[in-house]
Amino acid sequence: MIHPEIMMGPFEGRDWANFVRLFSGAGGGGSGRRLLLLLHRQGVVVKAIHSQRGVLRGVRPDIEHLDQVALEHDADTVICLTPEDLGQIFAEAEGSVDPGADYVEQMMALIKAASLGVRSRVRFWPKSPLRLKHVPYGLVERLFKWLWPDGTSFGLFVLDDGGRGIHASLILSKEDGQITEMANADALDLEGANLADQASTREAVMKATDSRPNAPWCRIFLGRTTFTEMLRSGRPLSFLKLCRRCGTAVIDPYPFRLRLLFFLGRVFARK
């Protein structure tokens, strides 16, 4: 599904860094969760690493009571395992990847192996991580080809809440059943465009993407705060559809097959 010689860019550091931070929870827009990783041998902690405070030296928390450990060290989530288990998880994930397979198939195999290893070897507080539903690659590939027509492009544009233009963006183009281009708003001709508010920014981006070789199949516009709330919602597709109804997100064009996907997602989520 991803072309082995995919065309990248042009990218400027700011836009790409902003895009990565949106998903990592950094940059003020994410959750800022405090995670504590405990590596132990036979119940004795040999290393404690806090996501915001770094390595905690000289601490010997009681791993039998992870709730108390979280309270003592100001952590929202505690992950506890042995160094050997950590190495085994990485080894099993690496061993699951077929170097000759499609990039997406490799990634799906990696995620499946890692999640199974985590589920069987790692203790979490306050709860276990989300149990991923492992979908066969063939089904994903067929859905990808059916949903998104060849010769078109998809764009995601996260706009600054204060009306200062584009905060982060992603543009993908598809040819012959594969993603052949990955770019962002730096690839658009926006010189001299009015980016004073979200409405004028959307208009400028639509005009610029309309003139590109691959016609837009779908463009999603939403503010930075709305985007981070969508990620935290746990049901991003349903949240996005609700935002569109409320006017806090714009989907243009809004293809029928995407509408059908939203509908099916809502139906199966109820079961």
Image (cartoon, rainbow, N blue to C red):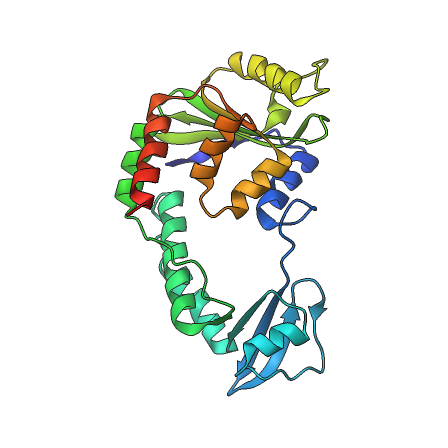
Measuring from the top left, give residue 229's x and y in whole percent: 57, 42
Q: Residue at x 26, y 42 (%)?
A: 138
Measuring from the top left, give residue 216's x and y in whole percent: 46, 19
Q: Is residue 200 above or below residue 99?
A: above
Measuring from the top left, give residue 158's x and y in whole percent: 60, 32
Q: Is residue 48 above or below residue 193?
A: below
Q: Residue at x 30, y 48 (%)?
A: 135
Image quarter in which the N terminus is found: top left
Q: Is residue 29 visible?
A: yes
Q: Is residue 189 visible?
A: no
Q: 188 or 234: nearer the eye?
A: 234
Q: 164 or 180: nearer the eye?
A: 164
Q: Residue 142, located in which quarter of the rendered image?
A: top left
Q: Is residue 106 above or below residue 170?
A: below
Q: Residue at x 54, y 47 (%)?
A: 232
Measuring from the top left, give residue 177's x and y in whole percent: 34, 29
Residue 28 shown left or right of residue 203 in the figure: right
Q: 111 or 271: nearer the eye?
A: 271
Q: Residue at x 54, y 17 (%)?
A: 209
Residue 147 shown left or right of residue 84 in the figure: left
Q: Is residue 166 above or below residue 123?
A: above
Q: 36 or 241: nearer the eye?
A: 241
Q: Count numbered badges in the picture.
A: 0
